[in-house]
Amino acid sequence: MSKYFNNLVPILLEQKKTDEHILIVESSRLLFVLNFLKKHFGFRFSLLSYIAGVDLISFSYRFCVVYDLLSVKYNSRLRIKVFLTEITPVFSCVSVFINANWWEREVWDMFGIYFEEHPDLRRILTDYGFEGYPLRKDFPLSGYLELSYNENKKQIVVEPLELSQDFRFFSFEIPW
């Protein structure tokens, strides 16, 4: 497989013990690589299985976008990884794989990774007025707002979240 990638210098090919192939690609070359892998006779990765986002909060590249391709003809899988900073966009691959539309919207909604030239980049899983990105590791586990139903007002009330255990003292002595 690696003989076709000799002229693609910024791409690193590695192989795990489980015979999985992983390509690490620069974000600027992603569309070229996806087009090449889809249309080349030796690969024919015609199916995009999924797109996932990963938050690597303690690394210099904050995010990783993972593309999983399937070649039905050759019965093989290929995983492509693109590492990004918080401000680096990645090009949308909807022009290559039409089913990438929903997965890119999900990654945008959950992580805040911007897909450049995406035809319809808007929230898909959270509410339109939602602030923040729930799958980022710096997002608070309880969120920022609390929703409750007020019997007196007969409506749903949105209030800032108050955590009552901020200054609680925890005793780690074993009582038994």
Image: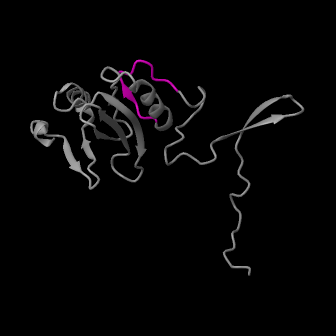
Q: Residue furthest top?
A: 119
Q: Residue at x 64, y 47 (%)?
A: 142
Q: Residue furthest bottom?
A: 176
Residue 80 is a magenta residue: no
Residue 169 appears left or right of 151: left
Q: Residue at x 59, y 31 (%)?
A: 130
> Observer-nearest residue: 55 or 44?
44
Residue 25 at what x, y percent from top left? Answer: 24, 39
Residue 117 appears left or right of 110: left
Residue 117 is a magenta residue: yes
Color theme of the render: one colour
**Secondary structure mostly taken by the magenta-highlighted segment of the chain:** loop
Location of the N terminus (image quadrant) = top left
Q: Residue furthest right?
A: 152
Q: Residue at x 40, y 18 (%)?
A: 119
Residue range (magenta): 112-123
Residue 86 at what x, y percent from top left? Answer: 39, 39
> Observer-nearest residue: 81 or 44?
44
Residue 71 at what x, y percent from top left? Answer: 27, 33
Q: Residue at x 69, y 69 (%)?
A: 170
Residue 175 at what x, y percent from top left? Answer: 74, 79
Q: Disc count in the image?
A: 0
> Observer-nearest residue: 49 or 130?
49
Residue 45 appears left or right of 64: left
Q: Is residue 171 above or below residue 129?
A: below
Location of the C terminus (image quadrant) = bottom right
Q: Quadrant of residue 2?
A: top left
Residue 147 appears left or right of 18: right
Q: Quadrant of residue 27?
A: top left
> Observer-nearest residue: 173 or 73?
73
Q: Is residue 45 above or below residue 9?
A: above
